[in-house]
Image: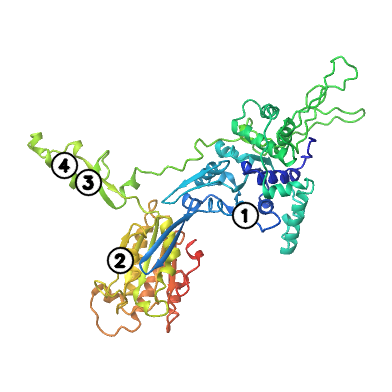
Amino acid sequence: MAAAPYDDPAHRLGPALVCAAADPALSGVLLLDLDPRLVEPVTRLFGAVLAGAAEPARPPLVLGAADRDEDLWTRTRIRGGGHGITVRTESGPLIEGDDADGAPPLVVVPDLARLSVAGMRAAVQLLGADVVTVERGGPRRTVRPRARWLAVCRSADVGRVSRHLLDRFAVRLSAAGLRLPGTGEALAEPEPEAETGAGEGEAREALFAGLPAGWRSAAEGGIRPVPVGDAAIGRARELLGPDAGVRRELALLRLARTLAALEGRPSASADDSDAAARLIGVAVPQSVPDRPENDPESPGPGPEPAGPPGTLPERRAAGGDGRLRARDGDRGLLDTGPAEGIGTAPGAAPSPAAGNPYPEDEPAAARDTVPLSGPRRRTTGPVSTRGTVIGTRRATDLRDIAHVRTVREAAVHQRARGTERFTVSPVDLHSYVRAAAPERVLVLLLDHTCRGGTGDGNWPEALAPFLQWAYTSRATVQVIEVGAADAADELRAGSFTARSVLDPRVPGALYRRAGRATPLAHGVELAAHSLRRLLRRHGTGPAQAWLVVVTDGRGNVPLRVSHTGRLAGAVAAAGVEDAVEAAARIGAMDRTRLHVAVVDPGREPYGDLPYVLADRLGAIVVDGRQGPGAEAAGE
């Protein structure tokens, strides 16, 4: 097999993507030092290779630093009906396309070093696996992973990535200096949409111009694996060295097997191992005929091993001092050597060699000891002494002592101890057990008197995105009700707190009958007190809170009447004005953690009142007649 011209990253990218698309065992592609501006064009090219010419490319799944296990493996659907809220758990985006027909899904990681711990664990479990069993929160599925992964990482950041994760990427090559045909000008200045599409097609055709005609059909339909000979196995071990792991050897042999199958050979040989090594950038020694040392016709030392594509051999003089040989009559010039940054400390760790597909083998950066483990949560100190008391336990220190339980425990043993004075022993000490402070909170303010218009019956649909967010994020739910027919006091707002949306009281609050009075101002005041109490706790408050107000803005109970419980004189617009004034206090709160939405039932007349209230709250307005978009609760 003749050596392929892999002297340019663009010449290696095309065969690498075809091999990854043709063989599921090569499902992971890692591009090192790729220009961030080329991530999207390369993603589109890979998607076009997977889809083929018969169907359009599927949209890729992009993973980043904020992905959680709940977002990757499962997906919840919440539907409202006459019997309450129905929660259905379905397969998540990582596995939903494995049983579907058509092209394999594409997962893109723009920066592997910044991928979340959940994303790293998912990659370790899926890449290179024949069968995966998923059991999370009820659903149980066994699938064969079909997705292809395209990840990008800087060589300097490889030390922050787990070696277990890096070994899962069977196809790894350096993309430093990659230039796609037709996209050179697009990197400097944005082009019109039509010209960009034309440039992408030109780049795709240029990438596969030098490949045999059968490679495209093999990429679309797959290939049948061919056996690997002993010579190929021995050659792979010789190329990688004795310290290479088993996964690295298997990756090189699988790539060699795929190249042999694409060329139509019945088995993989040592030449295929050499071709696979050249493709990913592993140095392949060049064999030369042996010559006697005293042979006058000997041209000198044999050629040095060829380095990775794109690198230049070192130029040395006969003396080996690193100086260039000066010509007769010319001034001697010194090699400038590699450039050094200003302020570089002597003895600093060198940067990984350009073109090396395994930069983690070089001590270029400090390594994380446990990159696949999440950060530890603090369970001691002042944070543990805050929260709702749910029980007691035997104390291990003198913080947060449960005095009543301690005295009761000591009283039981007073007669046995035989002391004249009441004695508390260390074994009597008990401390409180407190529930952890909620990380996410959903506050619902429901005005039941706005049900009489066109928005009647649409509450579950309008609130579904917010309830789904609360369910998936395990948020605590506080419901504030105004104007219910069965309220304990129709002049005051009522409230209750639930641990989650699955509490039976939450769906029950969505179907109450409307009453006569609307103490909207008191309900907004209760919401302001609750949010202020939650957000003022530095270090223990929620990371995110949503306030969702469902009202038509018609408050007919002034705030003074709600406080005193006595109605005297005409009300007029005092209830509406008090509600707007109370809403201004919420609008002045910290908006980095608090998000507010007002669901407008669309009642006439006075249809502008919800917008006035939303303006003071600093909220978005959701049309309650048609249901909100999914983006309303996705911020």
Q: Earlier in the sequence, mark 4 or mark 1?
A: 1
* Between 162 and 317, the one nearer to me in the picture: 162
Location of residue 444 in the rendering, given as x and y in whole percent from the top left corner: 37, 66
411 with respect to 596 (left or right): left
Residue receiving disc 4: 409
Q: Quote the CA–CA distance across marks 4 and 2.
A: 36 Å
Residue receiving disc 1: 102
Residue receiving disc 3: 402
Q: Earlier in the sequence, mark 1 or mark 2?
A: 1
From the image, state whether disc 4 or disc 1 is nearer to you. 1
Q: Quote the CA–CA distance across marks 4 and 1.
A: 68 Å
Location of residue 82 in the rendering, given as x and y in whole percent from the top left corner: 37, 69
Q: Earlier in the sequence, mark 1 or mark 3?
A: 1
Location of residue 332 in the rendering, given as x and y in whole percent from the top left corner: 85, 29
Query: Where on the picture, by quarter, is residue 243?
Result: top right
Q: How is the image coloured?
A: rainbow
Q: Which mark is residue 495?
A: 2
Location of residue 416 in the rendering, given as x and y in whole percent from the top left corner: 9, 35
For label 3, the SS is loop
Amino acid type shown at disc 4: Glu
349 with respect to 583 (left or right): right
